[in-house]
Image: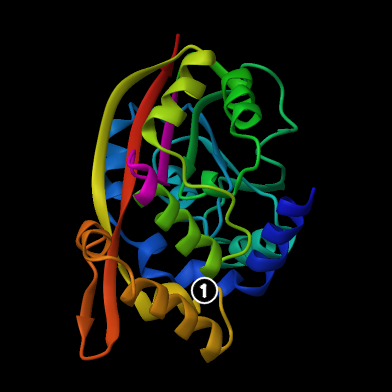
Amino acid sequence: MREKDYVKQVFSKNKDAYINSSTHANGNDLVNMIEWLKLAPDMIALDIATGGGHVAKQLAAHVNEVIATDLTEEMLRNTAKHLQSCENITFTVADAEDLPFANDMFDIVTCRIAAHHFPDPDKFVAEVARVLRPDGQFLFIDNIAPENTSLDQFNNTLEKMRDYSHVRSRTIAEWTTIFNRQCLQIVKEKRRKKRLPFREWVARTLDSDTEMDRVEKYLLNAAEEIQEYFQVERKEAHVQSFAIDEWMVLFRQK
């Protein structure tokens, strides 16, 4: 599938950037994740689309075993090298929509800042429900689109300009419909504005100044209400940072 080939291309090229990214390596969500999940030393956890391995590393200190998966083999090899001191993490190349694991295998499943790259979210959530044990916990974190159609369109156009492997940031309403189909029950949720440092964010996926300038101009030329919603901060003629919506939600398998 073309979208998955794009993901492999982008993440192979930028494997170190995602390990060092301030957006991915830091954040209150990593702390909240450990506070929200009921963890035990005999548990087995699955981290889907692990990227730089930040979630897997956090979980490894609290459970028996973590299996960290990613579609991009080169990214996964690089992350495994950085996390080689975590002896209870196993790394497996896997498609989030076709997981190579048995039914009811995991106590915990996590997926953080990745699902906007998945072309078939229904398949992804069905796979989560399949591999999760009865009464198991699923922690989901992703960028989300506003419910307003114009803001949604702007958000996804901006993301696609900056990263051609982006598929779609979906709304909470869209995700809720998908999760309900798989009988995943919300235990706790939080929506927040996530501030992104523009230059770091755009340089993580784009190489040329021309491409980066095009993305910056798209933000700078946006209508006032759009700039206000995304909290665009500028210094002189340049974007310093802006904010997008993120949803963190904990589910239990019904």
Give SS at disc 1: helix
Residue 80 shows in the view:
yes
Residue 3 image offset from top left, x and y in percent: 71, 52
Q: Which residues are magenta?
A: 137-150
Look at label 1 and name its amino acid: Ala
Q: Would residue 205 appear left or right of 10 to someone viewing this image? A: left
Q: Is residue 113 magenta?
A: no
Towards the viewer: 230 or 121: 230
Q: Is residue 143 magenta?
A: yes
From this view, report whether residue 223 is shown above or below residue 206. Answer: above
Q: Would residue 76 appear left or right of 145 to someone viewing this image? A: right
Residue 138 shows in the view:
no
Residue appearing at x 66%, y 28% in the figure: 123
Residue appearing at x 46%, y 76% in the figure: 215
Q: Would residue 238 appear left or right of 161 to someone viewing this image? A: left
From this view, report whether residue 154 is shown above or below residue 203. Answer: above
Towards the viewer: 200 or 3: 3
Residue 135 image offset from top left, x and y in percent: 45, 12
Residue 196 image offset from top left, x and y in percent: 32, 67
Q: Which residue is mark 1?
A: 17
Extreme residue in the right direction: 1
Q: Few, some or many C-alpha atoms within 10 Å of disc 1 (few <14, some 14-19, many ≥20)?
A: some
Residue appearing at x 53%, y 47% in the figure: 168
Looking at the figure, which quarter contains the C terminus? top left
Image-quadrant location for residue 36? top left
Towards the viewer: 88 or 141: 141
